[in-house]
Image: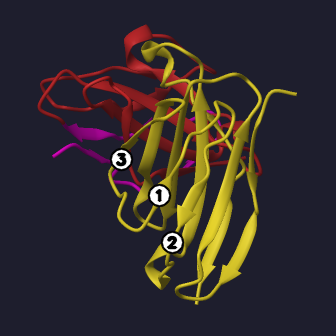
Chain colours: A red, B yellow
Amino acid sequence: AQRVTQPEKLLSVFKGAPVELKCNYSYSGSPELFWYVQYSRQRLQLLLRHISRESIKGFTADLNKGETSFHLKKPFAQEEDSAMYYCALRWGYNFNKFYFGSGTKLNVKP
Amino acid sequence: EAQVTQNPRYLITVTGKKLTVTCSQNMNHEYMSWYRQDPGLGLRQIYYSMNVEVTDKGDVPEGYKVSRKEKRNFPLILESPSPNQTSLYFCASSPPGTVNTDTQYFGPGTRLTVL
């Protein structure tokens, strides 16, 4: 079965501190993983995808197949990073099915 | 403005009374999907559609139906709602092309309560 686990429901850090939101997955094939973010009073939106190896808003995420992890990292957190973050796995015959983790609420304190 | 709309935004109903939650997008997207969000469980995919008249089950399709008669609309139908379908529902759409299904545009959500 495909599964995505985000072990932390809430993560609180001070502004300027490093941030790491954990995501572990279970998938028998080649995974495609993503991070979605939902800011307060905004819609859920794609933050980044592992395949593009991009940095968005200072966030990066590296796929570690050995540890089956896709942790989201940022070296210096900003208050505007406070949001709900979801890790997601895309799977299925045409890669049209999604499995989301339960989400981690990031709170960046001033 | 390019967007995904859902109606109604809030609904309280009773067990067994059929209801439909509408979803519409104005971006000519082929891929559309429905999710439910429950505390501690995140988003779970209910159904998705690759194009008109092409739909398939997601992770939790039981108790739901969908239809895709036109590209812009993807309604979610609960023929006989039950209290365990009380949830926050999201519709999403994606640009054409399999590789782009990750760039999902989400609707505002519909909060459904079944008494």
Observer-nearest of A38 and B105: B105
Residue identified by numbered label 1 = B65
- The answer to the question of whether label 2 and label 3 lie on touching residues, with beta carbons closer than 8 A, is no
Q: Alpha carbon of mark 1 to alpha carbon of mark 3: how far?
A: 11 Å
Q: Please state which amino acid type lies under the numbered disc 1.
A: Lys
Q: Is residue A83 magenta?
A: no
Precedes in sequence: disc 2 or disc 3: 3
Magenta stretch: give its range. Answer: A1-26
Q: Please state which amino acid type lies under the numbered disc 3.
A: Gly
Look at the numbered disc 1 and give the secondary structure of its residue.
strand
Q: Determine if marks 1 and 3 fall on one subunit.
A: yes
Residue identified by numbered label 3 = B58
Q: Please state which amino acid type lies under the numbered disc 2.
A: Glu
- The answer to the question of whether label 2 and label 1 lie on touching residues, with beta carbons closer than 8 A, is yes
Whether residue A18 appears in this view of the structure is no
Q: Which quadrant is home to the C terminus of chain B?
A: bottom right
